[in-house]
Image (cartoon, rainbow, N blue to C red):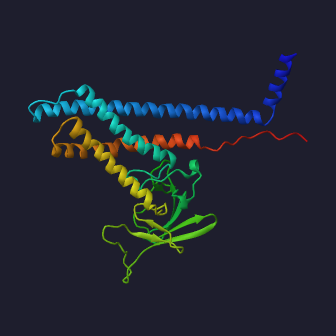
Amino acid sequence: MYGFKYFNAFYWHESSKLGPLLRKRATNVDSWSRTLFGLLFGVFLLWLSITVVSGAFSHFLQGRIYSQPADGFIWRAPASGAIITLTLVMWMMLDYGSPGIYRPIHELQSYTPENKKANLKPEDGAPYPSMTVTRADGKKEVYFKQPGNRLEYKSKINLPLPSTPVEIEVDDEGKISVFKPEKDAKGNYLRRTGQSLVYKDERGRQMIEGGLGALVINRPGATFLVLFLHILHFIAWFGCLWFLFEFQPLHAFGLGAAFCLLMTLFFLPPLLNFTETVSKQRTKPEVVSTPAKAA
């Protein structure tokens, strides 16, 4: 009797709209859990790589430039790897909460979040899906955003976006906005010292040469925090090389700058990409379609 009641409740539960929703949610959670595990495993590999590479390199180099290497590399290297990895994990946690906001300095102009996945608008930093560009010869061509997080546009025949177009037209929810380059009194392009050419529309919004397709979003707090993370990353390397591996301060400074630059250019961007993938899967909206009831 009780078995029949439980079966009956389970049957109506699965037949209702709640059943597909729960199954969909369970699938999303399971996918997110696997991706999160992959990210945690990647962090472990990062710590292991930093431990082995920094320890082996320091031991080898000190044997060449000093009378003898420092003692205790068996604990110095893991401790150094842990400190530097924790610094990068802090960076990844910030990027997890706000995907795309805390990218390295060299990617701030060329990196844009995927608006299809994150449901972002151009005012949030997402790129326009397409632009109508007036070239130097007066002809207009439509360029489309290429897949991925890089800010890259190409035409239907795979031509790259001109570096300095005469005019840019974008679709803002049915309204056409026109961006034109700044010019001086003589009609020449106005390039200020140390800055890129600025394109402005009638509302004062800006794009910059080299980052066309995405609006310039002023986030002074986020920019300051990114600079702080860069400095903290360098201090972690410098401190570990000086105090843990016992390099001379000048040697620790140079090696720390080299290791920090190497990590920032080649290892940090993939880590942040993976972190943003986990974040987007965690916050991805759930859409469940159910068949309409027959009349």
Above or below 35: residue 189: below
Which quadrant holds residue 172? bottom right
- Quadrant where the N terminus is found in the figure: top right
Q: Nearer the viewer, residue 220 or 195?
A: 220
In the image as oriented, which residue stretches furthest toward the bottom?
Answer: 185
Q: Is residue 255 left or right of residue 229?
A: left
Q: Is residue 97 left or right of residue 188?
A: right
Above or below 230: residue 4: above
Q: Nearer the viewer, residue 116 or 233?
A: 233
- Quadrant where the C terminus is found in the figure: top right
Does residue 48 appear in this view?
yes
Q: Is residue 170 left or right of residue 84?
A: right
Q: How far from the left and from the top, in percent, is residue 195? A: 34, 67
Q: How far from the left and from the top, in percent, is residue 110? A: 42, 55
Q: Which residue is depicted at the point 36% across and 54% down?
A: 227
Q: Which residue is depicted at the point 47% across and 56% down?
A: 153
Q: How far from the left and from the top, in percent, is residue 129? A: 55, 57
In the image as oriented, which residue stretches furthest toward the front?
Answer: 243
Q: How far from the left and from the top, in percent, is residue 170? A: 55, 65
Does residue 105 appear in this view?
no
Which quadrant holds residue 59? top left
Above or below 108: residue 137: below
Q: Which residue is depicted at the point 23% across and 29% down?
A: 56
Q: Which residue is depicted at the point 65% across and 32% down?
A: 26
